[in-house]
Amino acid sequence: MGQQQVLLLVLTIVIVSIAVYIGINFFGDMMRQRHVDLLVNHAVHIASEATTWRSKSTPFLGGGGSYSDLGTDGMEQLLMSEDRLPGTFRITLASGDDLEVTGVSDDFPEIGVRVVVEETDIVDTIIAYDGSISLPPVTP
């Protein structure tokens, strides 16, 4: 094999290796973004269900104009599970007119989202990639 052919072979191996490395990084970034999108989507869904629950009268198993009763077992009252792909979700704040829904990814624990509701409006959606959003420990 000539010197040019060896050089072309080495150059081809280097280019293919770089392309594979970039592809793996791109796929990892896309998976992380997919988890964020799913976490935000489900947290907004929980917030939407909670606003509907708040608007119902208490005889109809609603909140009677307050989120306060969702503070202890809110996900159960909304007939939703805390564990749902791709993460774990909890109602982390429930007072009269304020509600916070927090979700953390199961596969990427450093990714967390928080949806903030005031009265019936979602006023903020916070996304953290650094582990600053976490779920409080479950109290028995």
Image (cartoon, rainbow, N blue to C red):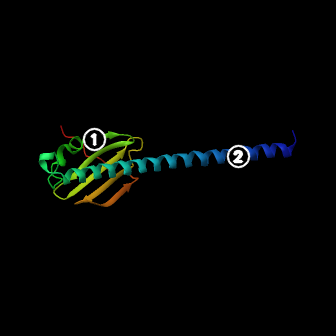
Q: How far apart, in angstroms, are the residues tagged by discs 2 and 1?
A: 51 Å
**Residue found farthest to the right:** 2
The amino acid type of the residue labelled 1 equals Met
Q: Earlier in the sequence, mark 2 or mark 1?
A: 2
Camera sees residue 91: yes
Q: Is residue 87 left or right of residue 80?
A: right
Q: Which of the 4 image quarters holds residue 79?
A: top left
Q: Secondary structure at mark 2?
A: helix
The label on residue 122 is none
Q: Quadrant of the C terminus?
A: top left
Q: Secondary structure at mark 1?
A: loop
The amino acid type of the residue labelled 2 equals Val
The label on residue 14 is 2
**Mark 1 Cα within 10 Å, few/some/many (few <14, many 20+)?**
some
Q: Position of residue 136 (x, y in %)?
A: 25, 46
Q: Which of the 4 image quarters holds residue 77?
A: top left
